[in-house]
Amino acid sequence: MATRPIKFYQVGSHAAGNRLLDPSLRSLQSDPNRSNAITKGHRACQGCGEALGARYAIDAAMRATGGQLIAANATGCLEVFSTPYPESSWQLPWLHSLFGNAPAVASGIAAALKAKGRSEVRVIGQGGDGGTVDIGMACLSGMFERNDDVLYICYDNEAYMNTGVQRSGSTPPAARTMTTQAVGPQPGNPFGQGKNVPQIAMAHEIPYVATATVAEPRDLEAKVEQAMSIRGARYIHVLVTCPLGWASASGDTIKVARLAKETGLFPVFEARDGVLSAVSKIRRQEPVEEYLALQGRYRHLFKPTRQEDVIARIQARADRNIERYGLL
Amino acid sequence: MLEQIEGSRAVARALALCRPEVIPAYPISPQTHIVEALSAMVKSGELAPCEFVNVESEFAAMSVAIGASATGARTYTATASQGLLYMAEALYNASGLGLPVVMTVANRAIGAPINIWNDHSDSMSQRDSGWIQLYVESNQEAVDTHVLAFRLAEELSLPVMVCMDGFILTHAFERVDLPSAEQVDSFLPAYEPRQLLDPADPVSIGAMVGPEAFTEVKYLAHVKHLQALDLIPELSEQLGAELGRTQHGVLRRYRSEDAETIVVALGSVLGTIEDAVDQLRGQGVSIGAVGIKAFRPFPTEDVREALARAARVVVIEKALALGVGGILVQDVRNSLAGSRAGIYTVIAGLGGRPITTEGLCGLLTAAVADTLEATTFLDLNSDLVERELARARATRRSGPHAENLLRDIGVVAAGPV
């Protein structure tokens, strides 16, 4: 009988199971003493990638700062599901102001802390792709340009999910949303040039930029910890599966996010001072079809007839990422 | 200390004495001289500790102010005109969250057509934004009112706009008595926030509130505005005692006690109105003026009392509600419910058009004779308007109004025929 050794990808060893690891290498989420910055009782959908991503990220930042952390949150799913009146899931000081101003609010918090000499308290700004890539872009760029001491985290689920799945500047080509419906001769979102915010962040030459997916919590935690060890403007862009908007099974949240990386569609990397410094290699390259087929937002590419040309164009985008970032 | 000084510089000097800790700023005329002076004071170390944040828009300026204020910092910014509109969403947010930001609005017209000169269209557009609005008549009042504004804002946890007329006040060199640091420190205690982003005691600020409590949250803000109506005169008296000069409370009266006709207005035009009142008094006309300092909250009772004996009220406004007429007059009329006084609205000074004593005397003489229209546009060039209306009737593609009018009055050279 043919056998195949199981590789435990997160540490690059062939051992399996978090509990076999040295405690320093274990996921923070396995630590019963983690801060639980966003606790149970929130109203996120089953399988919500954003809730998971925010928990990993904020818990890691809480550990990195010894709990000396303040968060500014953009309007969006994360804000709505975490603070339905009169409840709040947040276990850290948290401010929600508007949809498009979270980076500037975070800058204001950082400025106040600086004026008050409280340099030990750190600041996170966070929002979805709508609040970051679109309506918050000017404030984000201003925060980067001034190099304000803020870590901004974008949880990218590639559309306006809170308002019922409308297209954003982060929506990928061919994806169906309620404003790019799967009708007409070219169903779904048109093929545009896209808006690559990690690259835009790098163009500001800020000290640290990273991307991550919700499929790899240890990687995300490590990047947040890395970011908190640096002063100045930092940016982490996390791909978070949205079962509602992507029409994927709730149980596939991790699998879909992992395939986004393994196909090359979502490159996972780090950059220092505007220069690419590390990439997460693709462990086993998958064709984009494997990723697309799990999501109802791409159903029109397969039924009633297979859209070979569109699938090929999406594959070409993945191939370009693989080449550009050296993902293999 | 008496100085001959530009209004903006005087205000900046007074602001520095208030020890703001965060000043986000974005340039827009005519408020720039204020933040330029503050930025120099922060950079030189004269104003410390203070963070001056050069932001990328007015929307960001107010957003930085929101974050800073919620972190317990005394926060100041300034804007005008389009800038005020660009921060509109954040203005409502700051007041909704109860953050005591103080902001100068260097009043300027709103385009189109673009116009940098003074009127009150900008702050009037934010009438219901939940900010307290105080209008000042002179640079001395501007200086004193900024000191008052921080105390008022922080006692109530409400943001305050100090509205000073762009150019007319901001760029005017006048004699101003600047308060001393001791006087300001004595009047203005350190800021003690009611709510604070602090890791030692985590709170969530800005959570969603649905129908179950939204009315109550809004009502509480309304109650704070009503409290301001009592607090403004109280604090004005305290500040007056500290500075040794009279501070007007929610309004001021000028020869109005026995006046048959009372002129009501906001801001620097009151100086010209007072001159007109003096001239007409000299001709035996029974006339006076009431200047409203607190426009939001509106001092309905005080206005009713101040106008109780008037047979006629003339409201002079530097703003226009298109399709309606006056804005201030609506609140004045509300104060006069049940009164038989005749009420006139005069729209004047739009986009910086000068309001002269001569023009006012003519207008008020007509008002006293009750020959004035209910709503009048002071110095309106009706001929110019009629020509444009005729042009619009004659031709479908009659072109842009502003350019046509400028061509008619010879400001723009006539194009090809």
Image (tube, coloured by chain):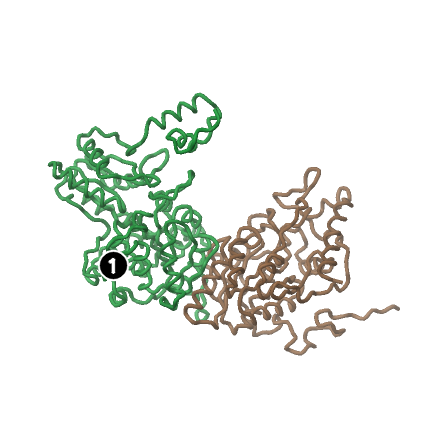
Q: Which chain is green?
A: B
Q: Which chain carries label 1?
A: B
Split into 4 quadrants, where in the image is the C terminus of chain A?
bottom right
Establish if B337 lies above or below A127. above
Of all residues, the one furthest to the top in this rendering is B394
- Give the amino acid at mark 1: Glu
Q: The brown chain is which one?
A: A
Picture quarter containing residue B187?
A: bottom left
The residue to which callout 1 is attached is B3
Of all residues, the one furthest to the right in this rendering is A1
Q: How many labels does the image show?
A: 1
Q: How many other residues sit within 10 Å of disc 1, few (<14), some (14-19) or many (≥20)? A: few
| Element assignment for label 1 | strand
Residue B407 pos. (x, y %):
41, 30
Q: Toward the viewer: B9 or B86?
A: B9
Tell me what residue is drawn at x 63 percent, y 54 percent: A196
Establish if B225 lies above or below B330. below
Establish if B267 lies above or below B180. above
Q: Can residue B127 be seen in this view?
A: no
Left or right: A153, with B68 as reference point: right
Split into 4 quadrants, where in the image is the N terminus of chain A?
bottom right
Left or right: B363, with A128 as reference point: left
Residue B265 pos. (x, y %):
25, 43
Tell me what residue is drawn at x 64 percent, y 56 percent: A241
Q: Can residue A273 be seen in this view?
A: yes
Q: Toward the viewer: B91 or B182?
A: B182
Q: Toward the viewer: B290 or A86?
A: B290
Residue A67 pos. (x, y %):
51, 72
Residue B152 pos. (x, y %):
29, 58
